[in-house]
Structures are given as structure tokens and as C-alpha cells.
Image (spheres, helix red, strand yellow):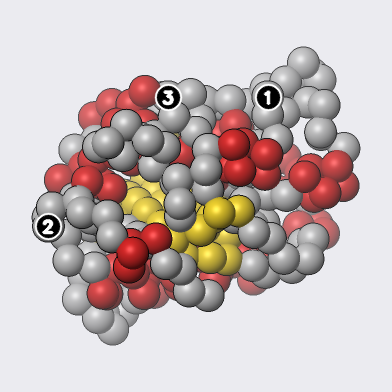
Amino acid sequence: MFGGSTIEEPDMKILMVLTSHQALGDTGQSTGFWLEEFAAPYYRFFDKGHTVTLASPKGGQPPVDPKSEETEAQTSSTERYGNDKELQAVLAATQPLSEINPSEYDALFFPGGHGPMWDLAESATSKALIEAFDLARKPIGAVCHGPAVFRHAKSPDGTSLIQGRDVTGFSNSEEAGVGLTDVVPFLLEDELIRLGGNYSKGEDWQPYLVKGGRLVTGQNPASSVGCADGLLELLRSSSPQRPNVRDEAETKSSQ
């Protein structure tokens, strides 16, 4: 675990789950998690004094998408991470997802990058974790390709966990813009719609996020800060451990 240093509000425990998948389909290129989508939310949580635990399917060092380390992808958060040896050491030792007890955490967050499309989207362990958080009425956030993790997650009634909820995620046009439409195992926009989510999107590469009940999702890397802040807002207003009753308020969203 890695705790914050400046306490501005009650310390909450946030679990961040990163991909362990490195191969970009059959291209021979590498993928992983997108650095900005990890660093920016992490520091939003850290600077508020919350305790953040990092996990991944395989544990240890999760792969960083090399494109997210290129000059044009750098932000103040990634630059801060580049000088943060302590966080780099924590990232290199993520906990295996199978060892995580969801009852020990107050909120769940999934950074994106293309990696989650292959492993977290299909992981039974990740699916069970998401369902446990949702059942306990704990907030869940996911940014960019992160919402792929909802692909197989179900509500107690057996329907898709995102059915009837407002969601966003990396758009088809953005996927085409990076030239990976025919490489990814599925198009996230199409999949979120197929699952019954009320999918919406903003302009390509511009910040856009939506809230659907206890879920907050961001469209792209530029949405990472807003998505993290949205999770913190949900965390402040949530009441964990109540029965999971879906009503009209549960499916309404706000931006």
C-alpha cells in the first residue's frame, strides 16, 4: 500500500487495477497501460491523503504502453511520476489480483491503455471483483479502454452491470485515429452499446466523462483527471455496504 501525505479529507482506501498484458495483438508491438491514465488519477488520490493499493492480474511490474512514454504524451503527472522513485518501486511490485480482498477497499479504479482489452476484459477474477464492489455499493471508475473491464460483469439479476447506466469509453473514431480498429479484439464503443449501456461521447481527444449510478467513466487520456475527481465525488457521497437496490436514481447520470 502507498498512502498520501497531505490529509484534506478522511483517508479512504482505493484499489487501482492495471493490466498485465503486453502484446498488441499480432502486430509484434507492445502495449500495456497508458501512463497518464495511471499517473494523473493516482496523484489525485494521493494528494487528497487517500491510501492507494496497486494490483494487476499477474502481480509485479505491469507493462507500460511505450507510446505513452513518448514526448508528445507527457503531462505534468507523467513528469512527476518520472521523478518519483518511491512510486516507481510500488508500481514494480503490484499485488496479484487473486490476493485482493474487496472488503478492504472503498473504491475501485481501472486505468486504460489497450492492455485491458485482452486480459482484464476476460478475467474472471476481475469480473468477480467488480461485481463485489457494485454489490457493496462502492464506487467504480474506469478511463479510456478501462471500461472494457465491464464486458462480462453482471448485476445480481443476471443482466449486464452497465445495462441502463450512462457510460463512455474510447470511441470508434479515436480507435481509427490510432490505426488499431482491426487490431483490438473488439471495439469498445460498440461493446458498451451491445451490453445495454447508455453510451455517449464527446469530441475526439477532448475531456469527457459521465456518471451512471456508482460508475464513473472517462473517454480518453484527457479524461483521466476528471474521471478520478468523479470517483472522489462518488466516494464522498457513497454509503458502502447497503443492499444493492437499483432504482431510478441509480441509473441517472451527471457530468
Callout 2: few (<14), some (14-19), or many (20+) C-alpha neighbours within 10 Å?
Answer: few
Residue extending farthest bottom: 8
> In the displayed structure, would residue 87 be above or below residue 232?
above
Q: Residue 139, how many percent across, how many down?
A: 32, 58
Residue that label 2 marks: 242
Callout 1 amino acid: Pro
Q: Residue 155: percent from the left, percent from the top?
A: 31, 39
Q: Which mark is residue 123?
A: 3
Foreground residue among 91 and 168 = 168
Q: Name the residue at 45% across, 45% down.
A: 163
Between marks 3 and 2, how big is the CA–CA gap? 26 Å
Name the amino acid, label 2: Arg
Q: Determine crowd level at label 1: few under 14, some 14-19, many 20+ residues with C-alpha closer than 10 A.
A: few
Query: Based on the displayed image, in which of its 4 quarters is residue 99 positioned?
Result: top left
Mark 3 or mark 1: name the one nearer the start of the chain: 3
Residue 44 lies left or right of residue 99; in this view the side is right
Q: Is residue 148 left or right of residue 137?
A: right
Q: Residues within 10 Å of mark 3 (few under 14, many from 20)?
A: some
- Residue 41 position in % (x across, y down): 49, 63
Kindly report which numbered mark, 1 or 2, lies closer to the viewer in this rendering. Answer: 2
The answer to which of marks 3 and 2 sits earlier in the sequence is 3
* Vertical arrangement, residue 71 with respect to residue 128, above or below: below
Task: Say which residue label 1 marks.
Answer: 185
Q: Residue at x 12, y 57 (%)?
A: 242
Q: CA gap, disc 3 to disc 1?
A: 14 Å
Query: Do the numbered discs 3 and 1 sit on residues whose CB atoms are within 8 Å?
Result: no
